[in-house]
Image: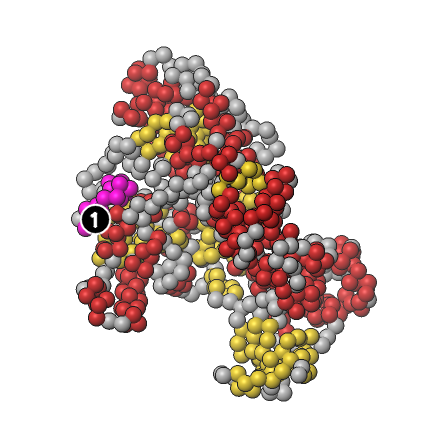
Amino acid sequence: MSQTLIGQIDRILFESGDGFFIAVLKSGEKVSGTYFESDVSHIKKSAVTLTGHWEEHKKYGKTFKFDSIKVNQNQLFFFLNKIVKGFTKKLSAELIEHFGADELVDILDNDINRLLEFKGIKEKRLKKIQGSWKKFRSMRELGEFLSPYDVSPALLTTIASALKDVEEPCTKIKNNPYILTSIDGIGFKRADELALKMGVKEDDENRLSSAMDYVLLDYCESQGNSCISKEILFNGLNELLGFSDINLYEAILVERVGEQSIVLMKNGRVSPARLYDAEKYLYDEFVRRAKKQNDVLVKNLDAFLENSELKLGEQQLQAVKTLNDGANILFLVGYAGTGKSTTSKTILKLLNTKYNEKNIMTCALSGIASQRIADTTGYESATIQSLLVKYEDRDDFPFSVMLIDEASMINSSLFARLLAKVHRDAILIVVGDDAQLPPIGAGNVLSDVLSLQIAPIVKLTKIYRQSENQAITLIANDIRQGIVPHYREKYDDFEFVDISIQNYYALKNQLSQSELSDIREQNSQNIINHILHLVVESLEKARYRLKNKEIKEYLNYFQVITPMKGGTLGTSNLNKVLQEYFNPNPKKCVKRGELEFRLMDKVVHTKNENMTSWSGAAFKENEDSAQRRIFNGMSGLLFKIDEDEEQVFVFYPNEDVVVVYDYDELKNYLMLSYALTIHKVQGMEYDIVVMPMSFSHFIMHNTKLIYTAITRAKHRCIIVGESGAFESGCRKFEQTRRDTVLLEL
């Protein structure tokens, strides 16, 4: 039977980070439960009324486990004084006294600018109040509505944050719980669990439509495909929903096709409309550009090449000749070390004989790749995202020549957006390496064009070695072909440090699984210990760059990369370990659950999102902020922590952007970047790359992954770990053929 307990929270004994806590009341009773309206720290020293029951906790003894908690003070006073940072008790009380509680609530809901009349409240403070109030109100309303359905505090916070600007969110969720699938971080399964608890029937139309979207998008976006057979779609629905009704699925599919949200293709394949439209546009545009023939650029190409300081091989010469003969589009594809940059530079110089330098633009997905192509060719470069933002109000880019580098990284949707902006008569050069990992997201444009041969293609295969002691490109290309390279030899730019378990296969037959697991864990720790030796060797040079405010150089100097996030050798653990070496004694830090962000930490942005930001110069001049698209994978330095406003500031030097994050956004948008996954560093380049190699990551090891990892190193690549795991990975070809609309057209 439910009981009531009233008291004042004195001390917090335990806090999980998601709202669950154990505390001691002033009277000595211990209490436990979940508080979701704000941080647990806000209710410390507050008088509360609890309803729940007594239980015996294995660590803390007799504890009152509450189901509901109510703070026994004026709601507005509590909100202003505890939740909105910077409000004193005096200012909070004066606001309530001046306006009255009911009028103040109305002002906060409908006319918040009236608070500017009140002394002590400026524009900056007003924005903070507005955002906090909306979230607070949303949290309370949704908390009361969703509490009967066992919604976790973390999920409630996610929902409340996303719906804080939505009118009557509870009514909308009640009418169709599957609207929650549109919220980042809430997939079909979590929304479906809630919906079924709310009484939604298994064959409800909203449920089936949402499930179809989930299966289709999971197969496409998560697995990289842009279309799927009906058979796979329906089998996925059977597995997800727990029943089979082909006729019902067909009816839902017909409805979705009629709504034009799904396209039914030949051979019974289906595609999300936006992916179909993107790849159909790419196919048509590549074909159209391939048919267009321009005038010859220079009549005497040999004379032009004789005056060039760059000497070309036969394959490279073929690429230059293709453009000179009037091609409007060229795909220049080559492996690491085949001279793509040299060829690109020559091609651009050739085009510069006809087009002004200001009409020639190069671009790439990442800031580092963009800078690299600018450095190697001498022509202006930008990230794809910055070009799209800069010219969003124009129909097309003002350039006569566009060179797109690192094209293997670009998924279908982004490639279509970019190509739609390239002037229809502009010359287009697409440069990439098809041995790299395929793009994150749906589609595999570069690979598909190579298969379809729908535009002029020149493939560079000859490796140009800089010196006998420079081996990264040769080792990488052996791996690409499934050949175990001569990795134990001594090179200037490559080293393999063998830390293997001696007599491992004999031990497998002698030891229990538990004993074997302990040995594997110890070996992983030995690998980390050697990586830390390498860190110590590099710290002085890294810190020299940071001390001299060479932020870009610091971020790109030393990088640990690993196949996975989890486990001892995954990014989560490695980041915690490496943080203690690179940034051991910060002046300030922010803790959110198990995460800790420190002043001067290396961080990476993790989701494509519009964020409050400034250019570097605008931030220094204290100019107004603007909303900019900040992209997954951008690497930066956390250079400022504002404890009063509960905000951190990150500078992204490759993009020259400063972004501000509220404390409660950190877990959603930032992670430490001392260690990154190999997928996360596609298109990046670092002076020194260190990679752990272990059988614990065996499921991820393949030729493409290891090839991509090694080619991220600019000057030195060091692999530390088990030679057997490395050799087996070098022999393991990964089939990366994706089901795409391009290949079905």
Percent position of residue 30, x then y: 58, 83
Q: Quadrant of residue 274?
A: top right
Residue 378 at least partly seen: no
Tell me, yes or no, whether the highlighted magenta stretch contains residue 479: yes
- In the image: residue 447, left or right of residue 385: left
Residue type, mark 1 in image: Tyr
Residue 419 vertical placement versus 247 (above, below): above
Tell me the crowding category of disc 1: few under 14, some 14 to 19, or many 20 or more residues within 10 angstroms, Cα based.
some
Q: 75 or 212, which is in the foreground?
A: 212
User: Image height check: is 27 above or below 582?
Assistant: below
Based on the picture, tell me whether residue 425 belongs to the magenta stretch.
no
Quadrant containing the N terminus is bottom right
Identify the residue at image location x=59%, y=47%.
Answer: 247
Residue range in magenta is 472-488
Q: Residue at x 46, y 38 (%)?
A: 740
The answer to which of 549 and 85 lies nearer the viewer is 85
- The residue labelled by disc 1 is 487
Residue 295 in picture, x, y percent from top left: 43, 14
Residue 682 is at least partly visible in this image: yes
